[in-house]
Image (cartoon, rainbow, N blue to C red):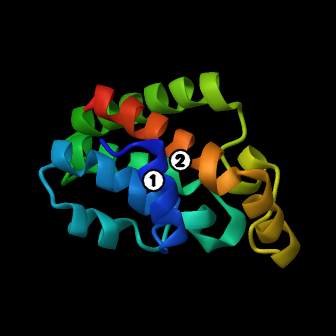
Amino acid sequence: MRSEEEIAKGFTEGIDCAMVTLHEIAGKMGISGEEAYRLAGCFGIGMMQGSVCGAISAGFIAIGYRYGSTGPDQMDQRGLMIAKREEFLNKFRKEFGDDITCPGIIKLDLRKGEDMKKAGETGVFSKFCPKLCRRTADIVIGLL
């Protein structure tokens, strides 16, 4: 796993939270880091809409990839996937709070220029989000 400092450096190079989190999980999924980046490419900054945190979305992608069903005759498998998703969310919420949206977690709306600037100034990208991404990947890997 990459260090929080390496993750923070990636943020300055255009790698977002969903991409970095799924990249950390990729080996456990049996996919390459490059594939992980592409799969997660639209999910950063709450799908760039201020929605569900990109790190959480990456966790959902990984859980769905590992435990998801492939047809209507696999309801037990679907149930397992839902249970793993809920276990993930419970563990995440214990550490980071109940809100799972990007603005709710970091208390800034990165779609707004002034909040994006404030995030850079206050260490959101250099300290908080790298920690969140690392910890989210650790939680998911523990479930896979």
135 vs 142, left or right, is right
Q: Nearer the viewer, residue 128 or 74?
A: 128
Q: Determine the secondary structure under disc 1.
A: helix
Q: Earlier in the sequence, mark 1 or mark 2?
A: 1
Q: Quadrant of residue 115?
A: bottom right
Q: Nearer the viewer, residue 60 or 29?
A: 29
How many neighbours does mark 2 have within 10 angstroms: few (below 14), some (14-19), or many (20 or more)?
many
Q: Position of residue 121 (x, y in %)?
A: 79, 60
How many neighbours does mark 1 have within 10 angstroms: few (below 14), some (14-19), or many (20 or more)?
many
Q: Are marks 1 and 2 in contact (CB under 8 Å)?
A: yes
The image's mark for residue 7 is: 1
Q: Quadrant of residue 93?
A: top right
Q: Identify which amino acid the numbered label 2 is placed on.
A: Pro
Q: Nearer the viewer, residue 74 or 129?
A: 129
Q: Residue furthest right?
A: 114
Q: Residue furthest left?
A: 30
Q: Quadrant of the C terminus?
A: top left
- Up the image or down, 144 lies above or below 40; here it is above
The image's mark for residue 98 is: none
